[in-house]
Image: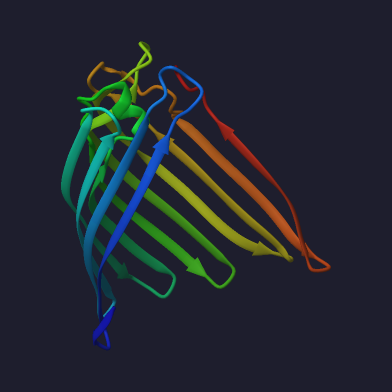
Amino acid sequence: SYQVRPETKAVFGADVSEDKFIGTGSQLAYALSRRNRGLYAGLNNHIGRMNLAINVRHERYHLQQENSTTKADYEANTGLVGLGYQVTPAWRLTGTFSSGFSAPTADALSSNPNIRPERHQSQEAGAVYQVRDALLRMVYFKSKATDAIIYDNNYTYINGNIDNEGLEFSGRANVDGFSIKSSVTLQDPRDVTQNLPQARRAKRYGSLDISRSLLGYEAGVKVYAAGARPD
């Protein structure tokens, strides 16, 4: 990272990863190696009450199934632009636009050698209220996945398009020594290709976490709930 000015910070770098999957115990077992190379850069700037963040990334993937002609090479440019505005000491408005990329897993590639990587676009707009012992956050989100990797009813991986839109509410507070955290998500994920609700995704889910420190230990309870998930 590099501090360009007191209000401006830049980050940049590269990452490299290599991994290998080796299946055993079946006539269908296979081995597959994956190599990833990535370059990234980002800039964070404060201008009065406003905060601007810009991130960009370029990456390349190479997947090769050993002792086979099955292989794939992927390349993508992704990024994020985020903006925040401090309306008052307690209230803050936020917004982001981002793109993403997800390479197929070893299992997906072995199932369908023609599988394509997922590409994502998402937008968010939200409001945050924060005081000393409490924080509340509300976010409207909308996302689109092109060539989403879907496991279909024929037990193979295919590409399709997925749209999702919804609201997310979250909060945390300290009340009389208790730490309380909760979140609720209301969404409408749809498989656009088949014009159906997205499989294995609930339209509503949430959680509640209440805990307290006692004699150096953390004790509490967590509750999770979700609506029906179509299969």
Please name the residue shown 26% across and 39% down the image.
63
- Across and down, in percent, residue 127 comes to 37, 58
Q: Is residue 38 left or right of residue 150?
A: left
Judging depth in this view, the residue of 76 and 28 nearest the camera is 28
Q: Is residue 217 left or right of residue 50?
A: right
- Across and down, in percent, residue 93 comes to 33, 62
- Across and down, in percent, residue 9 comes to 26, 79
**Above or below, 223 relative to 12:** above
Residue 108: which quarter of the image?
top left
Please name the residue shown 37% across and 47% down the image.
19
Quarter placement of the C terminus: top left
Judging depth in this view, the residue of 61 and 97 nearest the camera is 61
**Above or below, 143 relative to 109:** below
Please name the residue shown 57% across and 49% down the image.
182
Residue 181: which quarter of the image?
bottom right
- Across and down, in percent, residue 5 comes to 23, 88
Farthest residue toward the bottom? Answer: 6
Please name the residue shown 34% across and 35% down the image.
32
Farthest residue toward the right? Answer: 215
**Above or below, 192 relative to 48:** above
Judging depth in this view, the residue of 23 and 123 nearest the camera is 23
Quarter placement of the N terminus: bottom left
